[in-house]
Image: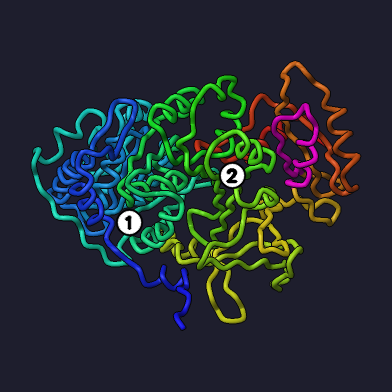
Amino acid sequence: MTATPDPAAELEREFGSFPALLAGWGEVRGQACALRDERGELSWAEVAARIQRIAAQLKADGLGRGQSVAILGTSTVDYALVFLAAIYAGGCAAPLTTSASPEQLRAMALDSGAQHLFVDRARLTELGEFALGVERRILLDEELWSWAAPAGTACEPFRPDPEDRFNIIYSSGTTGSPKGIVHSHLMRWRQMAFRSLQGYGPTAITLTSTPLYSNTTMAVFLPTMFSGGCASIMGKFDTVKWLQRAQAERATHTMLVPVQYRRLMAEPRFDEFDLSPMRMKYCTSAPFPAELKAEVLRRMPGGLIEIYSMTEGGVVCILYAHEHPDKLHTVGQPAPGSLLKVVAEDGREVPPGEAGELYGRSPTMMSGYNNAPDKTAEAQWVDPADGAKWMKMGDIGRVDADGFVELVGRAKDVIISGGFNVFPIDLEAELLKDPRVAEAAVIGVASDKWGETPVGFVVLKNADEDRLDDIRAAANARLGKTQRLSALYAIAEMPRSHIGKLLKTELRALAGREAPVA
């Protein structure tokens, strides 16, 4: 009898060369579109030729094996070419976060060890010629092709070992200096193992509208490039422009964060556009409310996949929302090869239905934080039973009887009021039941009486409507005594990062400027 293949074991065994794939697609896909942005498009033959020009010059400049190449700017075809060429040449792509401060950018550039920085003129102007400590600075939108090796220059693709560095993705840095998350060639190869099951292939046309410095974007950009498809890059998200491009280009795949889905659903012209070629839509990076998932499933063609994980790795949970409409309140089940533990404060693993801190392991873990073994160790939890290292996911969650994972809240955001744990997600859900509320967020603030007390922020659907006392009273009537909101504030919009993460640090600062609560 033939044994059923173990997907996790297959992930462990398989390894190939992404640089060789890029060269191969350049030959076999020839005139098919590979990259597109607002300015135009390049065929696979053109992409392969331009990658070789950049890679050859990087090597002529002395790029070492695994050495970083820093990139800073708006997402464009040329940005993507530099990213891919760095890997093709045997280096490590190090995209820098455009929303970071000059001091944070300098820290990232120095941490990466890059000798090359490719930067937009506009971003350099914003920085005021701020020194980033790199040896060579190339203006991405002005000097790239005068710097690159001459047209027709050939360059052999790098042959990676599994643990060679593929990229460094820098964390957002909202609570301090950004950390450089190192991914290996093996990690990225394993990540691509199931791309064909999600409709990727040479006919895939992926529309991206999140930044190329984000691992969120890499989750769809890299499978497209691995598969010989076409990646269509938007520098800045706009609902109507996204719809126009999705229709005109007959996009088959896309990655959108929850706030982008919400804006599309609210776009008055949404139903005018034909999105029927869409095979698969993705979402990650921020909580995706069940009611919003349901609306997306109802109004947008194709499947909907929510991915729960971290840039650092850990468990990877996948929710095939179109297959499990009764599980939209969850983030799905652990993917093949992913392991999950739900652990109580005393270190015991809790049974299904009970909430605890989430720890995960998978074949797609980071190599570690760049130059920071102490921070790498802090991010891990060591199982006292066998010494295995698991990533701390930073979330509180529970697993239902069917193995689906429901998130309760961020571990750092749990409010301890009167000695009881209060999970903001439960309070936010109650606020969102009010038809006047479009978005809701809850934080804990210091209280002399309770230690901490919950405070809410809402975005109202009607900006002229101000019935906060009624909204808070209605929510509190459905909440337990220790959960009740001490205050509620209306704001014009929720503070979010460039990839849609809610910035509760800014809400805490805002709460500190408001009147004190009991």
Q: Which type of secondary structure does the marked residue at label 1 adopt?
A: strand
Q: CA distance from mark 1 to mark 2?
A: 25 Å
The residue stretch that appears in magenta: 424-445
Amino acid at dot 1: Phe
Q: Residue furthest bottom?
A: 1
Q: Which type of secondary structure does the marked residue at label 2 adopt?
A: loop
Q: Residue at x 55, y 45 (%)?
A: 304
Question: Nearest the camera: 240 or 29?
Answer: 29
Q: Residue furthest top?
A: 464
- Residue denoted by label 2: 286
Q: Position of residue 246 (x, y in %)?
A: 44, 30
Q: Position of residue 513 (x, y in %)?
A: 71, 30
In the rendered image of this protein, does residue 312 appear above or below residue 129?
below
Ranked by sequence position, the earlier of labels 1 and 2 is 1
- Residue denoted by label 1: 166
Q: Is residue 313 magenta?
A: no
Question: Nearest the camera: 328 or 134?
Answer: 328
Q: Position of residue 124 (x, y in %)?
A: 32, 30
Query: Would you say 433 lies left or right of 294 here?
Result: right
Query: Would you say 461 lies left or right of 77 here?
Result: right
